[in-house]
């Protein structure tokens, strides 16, 4: 694809996302879009480390949960403004990432071992957040006070009681803004020296080292960026739902969702997590409708499908949907030019 | 008592010993679960993330055999173990092997995908409610003085040791066992002498699954079955394998017992919830400081 | 320029490199030869930081580099290629070379441009946008060389860069290597292809069972009985001399 084509493509997608809510009246579809963008953000966080960096984390919830908990606890215990706490949430999570990254990369953990240790850290954080009740409120979770004063909606970063536009679209545009920033950061990374070195480390760490790439430093930067993006998803979650507890924060659900989107959408591409998220959630909706008709409401259906899609994509389209779309595009262009 | 700055309760030596002994019983099951995992790793060089889901599936199988046929969980082994072998063989040959194109990172993700499908299928079909098996002898046992060992625990210990021994015999004496060890040591070389490596991979996966099914049989009298139970055990199994050394049978046994005892002692001193964290901590420490484990070999 | 003093490395009970010493002077092409398993690649790995020696020291341009990490050594101007080629398979040729270029250049556009120039230099200009995974073995070897060159090295360690090539490809690559030396890069190469060794090297070292058994001009070294025996076995030197004597008679 030429640069011009790419720019047009992106402009189209971003405009569509920016204007979509104005054309959608049903709350259910706004919620659907929000959820999709939310997972697209978590997915991009995973993608930076996993897709670009080749380090597959199976415990990415540790970054989501820590970001969410910092955001919630600083407001709950110290009464700080959410606009202030979010900086701490993001940088605090990046610091946690630095610790995990230092321990993992310093000792040369790769591949399966890295996946395992991230899983272990997520579990450890899960247990600690559940047990250390004095600090984290334990199993009952942290419940933030709902702000009902419309004048304070923006200040408290809570839009449920804001004006009509805020109430309907406030959180949508919040996650959209987060998406924009994190995707821009990823795009910038991809086109920078850091990105080239990260990808080199993914492809062949020894060869990269021989060519002057400090693999350890590059991986550290990647895990911190990855954590920061994922943590911003946690900030959004807390502001929207005003509640966080150990299972939601550190449970396997977020870890798994964070990796579905980029793998299915296309590892190591900026667009991948977004497309992947839309695909799986779209399929999930359709499946839920279909199953509801036959079996009633039963949990687990969408994840079964996601798992199957994951295996199918890995088997037949390892470059994900983006890879497939690119092949289709090339074929269409060839036919047009012929 | 003071330990690392923590204020821990004091117990008499009988309580501690009793806790340790129950840890040994628990550990024997961990060892059996880990055995399958370490075997699969030793031969295929992959960490089978679907291991926990397979355990859960086997436990459900044992449960349903008990529920609908009245079959005693231990006797159910006769059906479940061969069935698990076939299932594992097919899974590796048909899905995991095919989807992975032989690349390690992909295998990791494929086994994860498989585990997600299995777990959620179980959730969908069986619902999240816990199922328990009631056997007439589950409260009878032997009085050991410091603790009371119920029959299920004793059978679990005996069963695990027996199965481990049987597996060791199989690996040492039979042709297939030797072929498996050959493939584990030198894949290309094994191919060159005519061993069907794909078949051996599938056989190994089948045996690993069969081990897990045996463990399931031993676990069901004591543990309630629900879709998440695999996940609970899988982390422990990983810890055992990493501690004991990837690919080592002895390691799985020793590691299993060590983890079992540590967990029980952790529960004793730190309480139920924090006790669980000892496992994660051990896991992380081993991965960092001695990733080859106690008995493992340095892999390439 | 490069000074290796009594370097040793053991793996378990096996002494892979034993008290090896050598010098590479600036602007020269020096070769390291020896039978398979002699420890040549291990020595390269020790020099370039991929392995830590048990004993011995490496000095590069006056500075000690023993035990430093490969990327640090690369930044000092010493770069190695790998005997078993290690392309970044998922990237294009240009992107591969650009990784090397980034050692000197921060901007993406500049690095990609520099990559293009280097590719022309080694004769890969036509393949710039191909995926590295699609290259033939000759192409991959050239890519390995191009990547290393892009880092702007002062000393290039080439590990069997001619292996697996046919006669034409070897001749082409020999010309490229000479061009590289003429542009100011010192070259230290491991090689089995004698044609390349003879036509390129100013000086040769011979390694056998981890120890240096000979050094000197290539034409002298290949006549050294110790060297002949290392390659052809015990008593081979005597037999060859006897054959030459009967041929003369």
Image (cartoon, coloured by chain):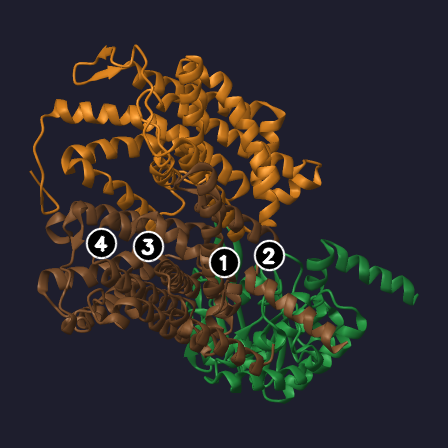
Chain colours: A brown, B orange, C green
Q: Is residue C37 left or right of residue B111?
A: right
Question: Between tags 1 and 3, which lies in front?
Answer: 1
Q: Which residue is rendered at x = 51% and y = 51% of the image?
A: A310
- Mark carried by residue A317: 2
How many angstroms separate mark 3 from mark 4 (CA)?
13 Å
Q: Secondary structure at mark 4?
A: strand
Find residue A106 and report its horizontal and vertical position in percent.
Answer: 35, 60
C-beta proximity under 8 Å, tags 3 and 4: no
Tell which circle, 4 or 1, labels the residue nearer the N-terminal end: 4
Q: Using the rendered view, name the quadrant where residue B215 is placed.
A: top left
Mark found first going from the N terminus, 2 or 3: 3
Looking at marks 3 and 4 on the same chain, the residue that comes earlier in the sequence is marked by 3
A241 vs B271: above or below: below
User: Of circles 2 and 4, which is in front?
Assistant: 4
N-term mark: 2 or 4: 4
Q: Which quarter of the image is occupied by the N terminus of chain B? A: top left
Residue at disc 3, secondary structure: helix
Which numbered disc, 1 or 2, marks the residue closer to the eye?
1
Q: Does the image show residue B242? A: yes
Report which residue position mark 4 lands on. A244
- SS of the residue under disc 2: loop
């Amino acid at each position: 694809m030429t640069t011009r084509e790419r720019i047009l493509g992106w402009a189209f997608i971003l405009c569509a996302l920016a204007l979509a809510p104005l054309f959608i009246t049903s709350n259910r579809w706004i919620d659907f879009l929000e959820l999709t963008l939310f997972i697209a953000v978590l997915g991009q966080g995973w993608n930076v480390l996993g897709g670009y960096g080749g380090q597959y984390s199976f415990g990415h919830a540790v970054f989501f949960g820590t970001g969410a908990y910092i955001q919630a606890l600083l407001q709950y215990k110290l009464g700080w403004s959410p606009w202030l706490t979010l900086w701490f949430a993001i940088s605090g999570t990046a610091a946690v990432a630095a610790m995990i990254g230092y321990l993992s990369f310093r000792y040369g953990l790769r591949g399966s071992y890295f996946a395992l240790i991230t899983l272990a850290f997520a579990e450890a954080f899960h247990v600690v957040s559940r047990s250390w009740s004095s600090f984290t409120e334990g199993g009952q979770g942290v419940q933030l006070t709902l702000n009902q004063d419309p004048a304070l909606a923006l200040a408290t970063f809570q839009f449920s009681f804001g004006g009509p536009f805020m109430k309907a679209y406030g959180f949508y545009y919040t996650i959209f803004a987060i998406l924009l920033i994190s995707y821009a950061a990823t795009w910038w990374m991809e086109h920078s020296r850091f990105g080239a070195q990260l990808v080199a480390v993914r492809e062949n760490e020894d060869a990269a080292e021989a060519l002057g790439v400090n693999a350890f430093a590059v991986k550290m930067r990647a895990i911190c960026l990855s954590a920061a993006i994922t943590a911003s998803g946690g900030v959004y979650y807390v502001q929207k739902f005003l509640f966080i507890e150990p299972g939601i924060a550190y449970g396997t659900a977020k870890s798994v969702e964070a990796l579905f989107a980029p793998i299915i959408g296309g590892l190591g591409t900026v667009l991948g997590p977004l497309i992947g998220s839309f695909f799986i959630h779209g399929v999930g909706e359709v499946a839920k409708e279909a199953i509801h008709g036959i079996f009633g409401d039963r949990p687990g259906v969408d994840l079964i499908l996601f798992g199957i899609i994951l295996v199918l994509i890995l088997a037949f389209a390892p470059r994900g949907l983006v890879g497939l779309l690119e092949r289709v595009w090339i074929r269409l262009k060839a036919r047009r030019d012929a | 008592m003071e330990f690392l700055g923590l204020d821990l309760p004091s117990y008499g030596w009988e309580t501690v010993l009793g806790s340790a002994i129950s840890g040994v019983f628990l550990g024997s099951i961990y060892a059996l679960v880990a055995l399958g995992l370490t075997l699969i790793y030793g031969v295929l060089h992959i960490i089978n993330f679907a291991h926990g889901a397979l355990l859960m599936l086997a436990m459900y199988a044992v449960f349903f055999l008990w529920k609908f046929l009245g079959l005693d969980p231990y006797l159910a082994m006769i059906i479940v173990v061969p069935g698990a072998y076939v299932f594992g063989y097919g899974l590796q040959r048909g899905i995991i092997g095919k989807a992975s194109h032989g690349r390690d990172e992909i295998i990791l993700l494929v086994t994860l995908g498989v585990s997600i499908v299995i777990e959620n299928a179980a959730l969908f079909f069986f619902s999240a409610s816990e199922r328990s098996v009631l056997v007439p002898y589950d409260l009878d046992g032997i009085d050991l003085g410091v603790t009371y060992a119920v029959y299920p625990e004793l059978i679990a210990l005996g069963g695990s040791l027996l199965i481990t021994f049987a597996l060791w015999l199989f690996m040492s004496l039979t042709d297939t066992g030797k072929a498996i060890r050959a493939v584990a040591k030198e894949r290309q070389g094994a191919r060159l002498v005519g061993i069907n490596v794909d078949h051996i991979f599938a056989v190994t996966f089948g045996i690993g699954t069969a081990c897990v099914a045996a463990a399931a049989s031993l676990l069901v009298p004591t543990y309630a079955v629900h879709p998440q139970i695999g996940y609970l055990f899988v982390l422990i199994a990983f810890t055992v394998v990493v501690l004991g050394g990837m690919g080592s049978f002895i390691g799985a046994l020793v590691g299993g017992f060590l983890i079992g005892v540590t967990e029980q002692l952790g529960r004793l001193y730190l309480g139920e919830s924090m006790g669980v964290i000892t496992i994660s901590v051990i896991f992380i420490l081993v991965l960092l400081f001695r990733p080859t484990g106690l008995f493992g070999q340095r892999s390439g | 320029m490069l000074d290796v003093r009594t370097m040793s490395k053991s793996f378990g009970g096996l002494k892979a490199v034993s008290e090896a010493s050598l010098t590479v002077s600036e602007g020269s092409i020096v070769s390291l030869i020896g039978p398979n398993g002699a420890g040549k690649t291990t020595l390269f790995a020790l020099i370039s930081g991929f392995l830590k020696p048990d004993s011995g020291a490496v000095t590069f341009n006056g500075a000690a580099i023993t035990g430093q990490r490969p990327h640090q050594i690369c930044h000092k101007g010493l770069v190695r290629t790998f005997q078993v080629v290690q392309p970044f398979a998922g990237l294009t040729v240009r992107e591969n070379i650009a990784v090397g270029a980034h050692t000197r250049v921060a901007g993406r556009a500049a690095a990609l441009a520099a990559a293009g120039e280097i590719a022309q230099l080694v004769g890969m200009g036509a393949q710039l946008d191909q995926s590295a995974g699609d290259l033939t073995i000759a192409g991959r070897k050239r890519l390995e060389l191009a990547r290393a060159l892009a880092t702007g090295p002062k000393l290039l360690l080439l590990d069997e860069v001619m292996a697996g090539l046919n006669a034409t490809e070897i001749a082409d690559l020999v010309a490229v290597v000479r061009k590289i030396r003429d542009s100011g890069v010192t070259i230290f190469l491991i090689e089995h292809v004698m044609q390349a060794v003879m036509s390129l090297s100013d000086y040769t070292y011979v390694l056998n069972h981890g120890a240096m058994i000979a050094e000197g001009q290539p034409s002298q070294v290949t006549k050294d009985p110790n060297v002949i025996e290392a390659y052809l076995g015990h008593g081979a030197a005597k037999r060859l001399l006897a054959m030459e004597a009967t041929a003369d008679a």
